[in-house]
Image (tube, rainbow, N blue to C red):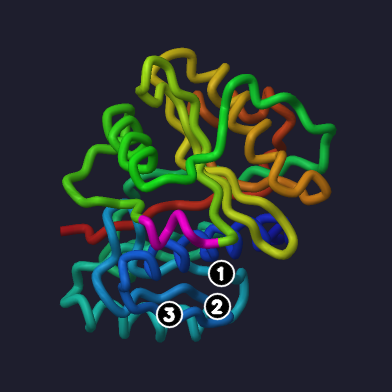
Amino acid sequence: MTIDPRAVVAANNNADLYEAVFSAHQAHYERLPHAFVAIDQPPPYYSHFTILTDDHAEKVSQSFMKVMERFSGDAGMKDSFCQTSEVANNLRVLFGASWIWRDVQSAAPREGWSRVTSADDLQLWEQAWKLNGSPTDVRMFNERFLAREDIFVFGQKRDGVYVSGCIGNLSNDCIGISNIFSAGDGKQAAREAVAAVGSIAPDLPMVGYEAGEELDTMRGLGFEVVGQLRILVPAS
């Protein structure tokens, strides 16, 4: 199966976001050419093992076996190119999604969105993010995360409360968009999130991954599907 090289770029940008989140939580990890590997327990919503290349199948298999041993079999995988046998690894598919890519386009206005720069606003932003589809008792995004030069947290406030937001993460060859949320019109929020993230580096393409209605929305905003991925979790 031929893999679109843009999917590999998107997967590695996503691993850059993983590095930012793991580092902010002071969780140890290893970034290998073929995979992002958790040494410590990952934060919620983050996999123990993320494949970063469509070759080196033997190294991927060996590395994941070590991860399963480290976490006593309770480890999940982001199968970034749908090339792993879930049955052979005692895994099941939690959900599937598509890598998306948008070529460089003219910048659009942010329409009231601004970058989150303070600890207080970050806490408010995270509260809204959790209420609108990402519940967890863990503090996910802290000051260490916010202070990184490659991380951009955006949001729109109304009456002192965030009603929509997203995260952009900057890599050398692209910008990633993720964690889009909205308390209202999701399509409008996605459009404004793309505009906000696009302002980071207008000369770079934008990448991410989505599924379902959110994928349809992003395709309507000029994104192209460039690959498929799956989130795999222990089968039992």
Of the two numbered discs 2 and 3 in the rendering, the one whose residue sits closer to the viewer: 2
Of the two numbered discs 1 and 3 in the rendering, the one whose residue sits closer to the viewer: 1
- The tally of labels here is 3
Q: Residue beneath label 2, please?
A: 34
Give the x, y percent position of residue 78: 43, 60
Q: Could you tell whether 67 is left or right of 209 in the image? A: left
- Quadrant where the C terminus lies? bottom left
Between residues 114 and 86, which one lies in front from this camera angle? 114
Give the mark nearer the N terminus: 2 vs 1.
2
Between residues 157 and 22, which one lies in front from this camera angle? 157
Answer yes or no: is residue 10 visible: yes
- Inspect the image, locate mark 2, and give the three-letter code of the amino acid beneath it: His
Q: Residue beneath label 3, please?
A: 61
Q: Could you tell whether 210 is left or right of 48 in the image? A: right
For mark 1, give the secondary structure: loop
Q: State the residue at coordinates (50%, 44%).
A: 153
Disc assigned to residue 52: 1
| Mark 2 Cα-neighbour bin, 10 Å: few <14, some 14–19, many ≥20 | some
Main SS of the magenta part reads helix
